[in-house]
Amino acid sequence: MRLRYLTAGESHGPALTGIMEGIPAGLALTIEHIHADSVRRKMGYGRGNRMKIETDEVKILAGVRRGATIGSPIALFIENRDHQKWLDIMAIEPREGEAARAVHIPRPGHTDLVGGIKYDRDDMRDILERASARETAMRVALGAIARRLLDEIGVTIASRVVRIGEVVDETPLDADIATLNARVDASPVRVLDPHAADRIVAQINAAREAGDTLGGIFEVVAGGLPIGVGSHAQWDRRLDGRVGEAFLALNAIKGVELGLGFRGAALPGSAVHDAYFPGTGGARATYGSNRAGGIEGGISTGQPVVVRAAMKPIATLMKPLPSIDLRTGEATSAYIERSDVCAVPAAAVIGESLLALVLADAVLETYPADTIEALRENVGRSRERARAR
């Protein structure tokens, strides 16, 4: 069994919709489970005014009855409250003449130009509305369902920001994964070091004053994943490859690493690979470190999965870069659309959802089950087998 999901909807359209297939029957699921992550996605200093408009309240339309999944596809709905101001601009029915707020001047770093060329659209709003990160509100909602499934087998996921602009916070993770989110969610920029938070806030303020934007790096960690999820047997079953694909498909992400990642390229093998030592409690072997980030050869090791992603600065600048008016071919300044100054803290929360979706899919592939009770039993037997090796 595999987990499948799709999303649909434009940034200023009526709503975002999502459908997920493959969740076993009997999983306890309520709106509260989903809404908690939707609220966290809106967090972070440097977000734009759109976050004050949208409540991101999720409606479950199918697949859940009396607080539990029933094995059929789950359908979700999120209303775009801002759509009320865009009724004519985003009208579905035919209209005469050009729509208001048509876009003919592409923004460097966005999908406007290449998408307009690919789909032969004169008004690049047809491209930017779907390319917008607004779509991630639905991916987070779907990811919350995947997180609920992982909860049932003892897998916990959390995230933090390790860099925004020039400010770095490499505070060691001295708390368990289950408490990490509570600590970093208390920070306006989701870092562990309060002094780094103050410097980042000042940096974001300076970027806003300059009409500029900032990117950064975030880290997502998953603990409790059993040994043996994923496979080396085919390239598209390798767990690390599936993680990389999901994160690189997130808006503005330009680099992904697991464990030491790029840092390991500058070190000798003796400082990169994880040595094995005699196990305890009946286990045959234990790891002396987790430089691999919880995945070796495409298969989970039982150690925490550690993913880092680099997010480029948001491409919409209030002091725009040079561009071209595609109607005339003349040089001009890029189009300006309402945007954030920095969205790295929000991207970290979205990253949790992406990792949850990948891991839930891989878990269901490794331990096929039609009911949540059968999944718990299958995973439990696997853990016992691993301890006995």
Image (spheres, grey):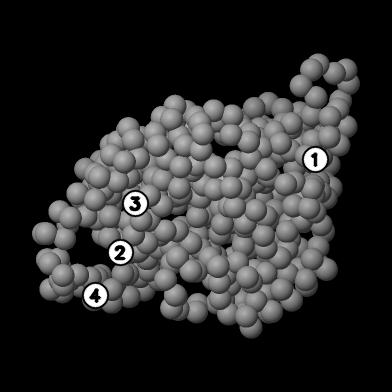
The single residue placed furthest to the bottom in the displayed view is: 195
- Local secondary structure at mark 1: helix
Q: CA distance from mark 4 to mark 1?
A: 52 Å
Callout in the foreground (4, 3): 3
Q: Residue at x 30, y 36 (%)?
A: 369
Residue 170: numbered disc = none
Indicate the amino acid at tag 4. Answer: Gly
Q: Residue at x 23, y 70 (%)?
A: 287
Q: Is residue 235 above or below residue 247?
A: above
Sequence-wise, the earlier of marks 2 and 1 is 1
Residue drawn where x is 17% and y is 55% of the image: 384
Q: Label 2 belongs to which residue? A: 303
Q: CA distance from mark 1 to mark 3?
A: 38 Å
Q: Give the amino acid at mark 1.
A: Asp
Q: Nearer the viewer, mark 3 or mark 2?
A: 3
The 10 Å Cα crowd at callout 2, few under 14, some 14 to 19, many 20 or more, is many
Give the residue displayed 24% in from the left and 44% down from the top: 378
Tell me if residue 257 can be seen: no
**Lateral position of residue 151 relative to residue 250, left or right:** left
Q: Secondary structure at mark 3?
A: loop
Tell me whether circle 4 and circle 1 mark residues in contact (CB < 8 Å).
Answer: no
Task: Indicate the amino acid at tag 2.
Answer: Gln
Residue occupied by mark 1: 82
Question: Sequence-wise, which precedes: disc 1 or disc 3?
Answer: 1
Question: For the residue labelled by badge 2, is the local secondary structure a helix, a strand or a loop?
Answer: loop
**Quadrant occupied by the C terminus:** bottom left
Spatial CA span between label 4 and label 3: 25 Å
Image location (x, y in percent) of residue 180: 50, 69
Q: Is residue 96 above or below residue 180?
A: above
Sequence-first tag of 4 and 1? 1
